[in-house]
Image (cartoon, rainbow, N blue to C red):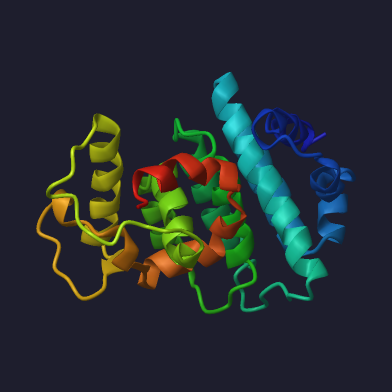
Amino acid sequence: MKNTKARTLLNKGFSITGASIGSALGFLAGGPAGAAAAGALGVVIDQTLSEVASRLLSEREQSRIGATAQSAIVKIETLKKEGRKVREDGFFDGDRSSAEEVFEGCLLASKNSHEEKKAIYLGNLFASICFSIEIDKHQANRLISIANGLTYSQLCLLNIFKNKNKYRLKDTNFREAKLTFKHVVIIQEIYALDRDGIIIFEGQHVFGITDVKPNVARVQGIGFALYDLMDLASIPDTELAELVSFISV
């Protein structure tokens, strides 16, 4: 049966997501016919996941791909329950649809990332794009590329800066601070987000990492899009606590 390997990958993802895959398997339980019953989106997931599953993959690569596919399906189901409508602009049409290309891109980004926690949020990215008619294939591929280039800590930092009113972030720079190596790494991560235009420091120019003022950092542009599309708001507070402690008063 075509989707046997796809179901195996979904099972592998359990080691990362820790979530039930019941809803994920529902897409594939009936094979290609079952996926077709779920609409064009179900067919894309079935075909793309089955094709990727046919490649030579290590155990950990299988786990990351499975986690991304699993989280994508769960997020799709969530968005449907919220009343969102799957896009109908041709995104799922053709022998090699834009949706297949974008989903494969998210799966391969996950496969090649050693930071396994990113897998869940790459799945959310694909799911959200399936409901966002304003994002075409080229924009989607750019978003995947940018997300792939960010560390998991940087995804956490986007959450922190988007919700900075919850914290007492440091409102002075680090020029006079006694920095540990951990401090330097985190500040460098923040500085890189600013350099790439993902965040901006309001009212100041940042010439080096010690100029960083966490409390005036604001998520902007692509950063805001990634926060929304990857559902970074769902990152658990326990994942943020250590980062917050290093950039707080």
Position of 207 with respect to 236 (left or right) is left
Position of 182 with respect to 141 (left or right) is left
Residue at 26 percent across and 46 percent down: it is: 187
User: Is residue 39 or residue 228 the one in the foreground?
Assistant: 228
| Horizontal and vertical percent position of residue 170 | 31, 56
Which residue lies most toward the left here?
207
Q: Image quarter for residue 82?
A: bottom right
- Residue 197 appears anywhere in the view: yes
Residue at 49 percent across and 62 percent down: it is: 227
- Residue 43 appears anywhere in the view: no
Residue at 77 percent across and 38 percent down: it is: 3
Instruction: Check the image and report above or below for 151 versus 194.
Output: above
User: Is residue 221 or residue 210 the one in the foreground?
Assistant: 210
| Horizontal and vertical percent position of residue 115 | 46, 34
Q: Image quarter for residue 119?
A: top right
Q: Image quarter for residue 161?
A: bottom left
Instruction: Check the image and report above or below for 238 versus 86.
Output: above
| Horizontal and vertical percent position of residue 143 | 42, 60
| Horizontal and vertical percent position of residue 117 | 54, 38
Residue at 56 percent across and 50 percent down: it is: 121
Position of 166 with respect to 8 (left or right) is left
The N terminus - image quarter: top right
